[in-house]
Image (cartoon, grey):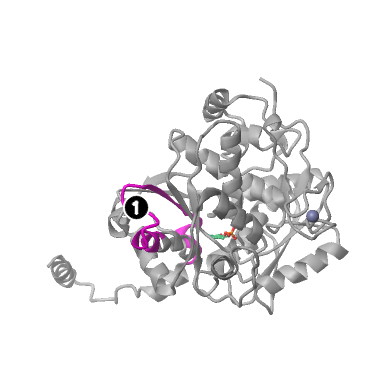
Amino acid sequence: MPEAGLTQPELRCIGCNATFADPARDFRCIHCGDLLEVAYTVESSPVGAPALETLWRSRKMSLDPADQSGVWRFREMLPILPDARAAVTLREGNTPVYPMPRCARSAGVDHLLAKHQGMNPTGSFKDTGMTAALSVARLKGFEWVGCASTGNTSASMAAYAARAGMRALVLLPEGKIAWGKLAQSVDYGAHTVQLKTDFDGCVNVLIEVVRRYPLYLLNSMNPYRLEGQKTAAFELMEQLDWQVPDHLIVPGGNLANSSALGKGFVEMRSIGLIRTLPRISIIQAAGANPLVRCMKEFGGRRMEPVKAETRATAIRIGNPASWKKAVAVLRETGGACEQVSEEEIAAAKQEIGAEGIGCEPASAATLAGLKNLVRSGFVRRADSVVLLLTGHCLKDPEYTLDMRKPALAIDADPAAVIQLLEASGA
Ligand SMILES: *Cc1c(COP(=O)(O)O)cnc(C)c1O
Ligand SMILES: [Zn+2]
C-alpha cells in the first residue's frame, strides 16, 4: 500500500485560479487578493474508493497515533504532509453521531442525527483543522503561531502549539469571549491578549503583525485548516455507512467550516465514495447575518460586512473571510441560508441539552434553523437530516445560567425535597 501525500499539493486561488507552491504570509492571492484552497486532484489519492473504506476502517484498530487521529486516518485525502507521522495530534476527530428523537419530533422530521464535533480534544471542531495547519507550521520551521479568535480557535491553537513546543499568540475581542474558552487558552500557556475591538478588528491587527513579524497565521484564511476540517465529512459518511443524508445543517460564522465540509463532500463524490451530495444549509444568528444578506440581497455576488451582535459568541462575526467559498457550497449542494433569533437559539439549546447531549449556543443555531426550514417546506418530514454540533456544552456555562436560572436553595429537609418532587410530577 503506497503511503499517500508524498507530494505537497499546490494552493489555488479561488478567484483567478493562480497556483502557488509557497503562499504569501496572509494566505491571500498576490494577484487578486482572494483566498486560496488546497488543490486536490483525484490523482492525489492513489487508492480506489472500496479500498479506502476498508483501509480507513482498519486504522481504527491501530496503535499508531496518526491512525488513531480521526483526521490523519483519512490521509489519502489529506496530502499536505510528507508523512502523517509528522503530524501534531491530540487524537482529534472520532466524534460521535447521536440520534435526536425528541428534537426530531419537535422539529417535525422523522430522522434526525447530530454529529457532535464538540467532543474533540479541546471541545470544538477547530481541532480537526488545527492539527493540519499547525503541523504545516512546524514543518516550515516557525517558532510562533497566532490567531484572532472568538475563543475556540485560540483554545485549539494554544493546545496544539503547546503539544508541538511552539509559542502561541492569541488576540481576543475584549469582554466578548466565553470564559471556558479564555481559560483554556491561558491554561495551555498561550500569550493571550484582549484587544479593545471586536473579532473583525482583531483579525485586521493580526494580519498587520504577520506581515511584519515571523508568525504563522492560523486564522481560517489558512487553507490547511479547512483541509483538516473537511475530514469530518468523511468520518460522517463512514458512520452513516456511506448513505448520504438529504440535509446537513451547519452554523455559519467565519464560514470556514461549511466551506470545508462542502469541499470534503465534493471530493468524496469525485473519487466515487459517494454519488450524491447532501444539501448543506448554513444558519446564522440574526444579529450576525452577513451571508444571509449576501444571498438574499445580492444573490451571492457581494457581501457587505455587518456590525455583529449575538450571545452565540462563536458566530459573532460580521465580516466572514470564507464567504465566497460558502456561497459556492450553497450553490453546488443546493443548501439554504437562514437566520435565527436569540430566543430561537436559546430554546433550541435547551432541547439539545434535554437529549443528554448539550452544546454551545452557536451549535444550537442548527436546530433552530432546521425548525424554520421545516416550516418553510425546504426540509420535508421524511428527509434524513444531520445537525453539525460545533462546540461543547461546557464552553459557555455563563450563557446557560443566564438564560435559565437554576433552582433556588431550599431547606435541607427531605420533606421539602419530596414536596418539590410531587409538585413537578403533577
Ligand atoms: C468557529 C465556530 C463556529 C463557526 O464556524 P465558522 O467556520 O467560523 O463558520 C460555530 N460554532 C462553534 C462552536 C465554533 O467554534
Ligand atoms: Zn487570485
For image coordinates 73% across by 37% down, the residue present is 86
Q: Say which of 27 and 131 sits in front.
A: 27
Q: Which residues are magenta?
A: 370-396
The answer to whether residue 395 is magenta is: yes
Q: Quadrant of ligand 2?
A: bottom right
Note whether residue 187 is visible: no
For image coordinates 72% across by 52% down, the residue present is 14
Query: Mark 1 is on which residue type?
Result: Arg
The answer to whether residue 224 is magenta is: no
Q: Quadrant of residue 301?
A: bottom right
Q: Quadrant of the C terminus?
A: bottom left
x and y percentages locating residue 304 in the rendered image? 64, 72
Q: Quadrant of residue 300?
A: bottom right
Is residue 157 positioned above or below 81 on the image? below
Residue at image mark 1: 380
State yes or no: Cβ of the residue under disc 1 lies below 8 Å from any atom of ligand 1.
no
Q: Say which of 311 and 161 sits in front.
A: 311
x and y percentages locating residue 166 in the rendered image? 76, 52
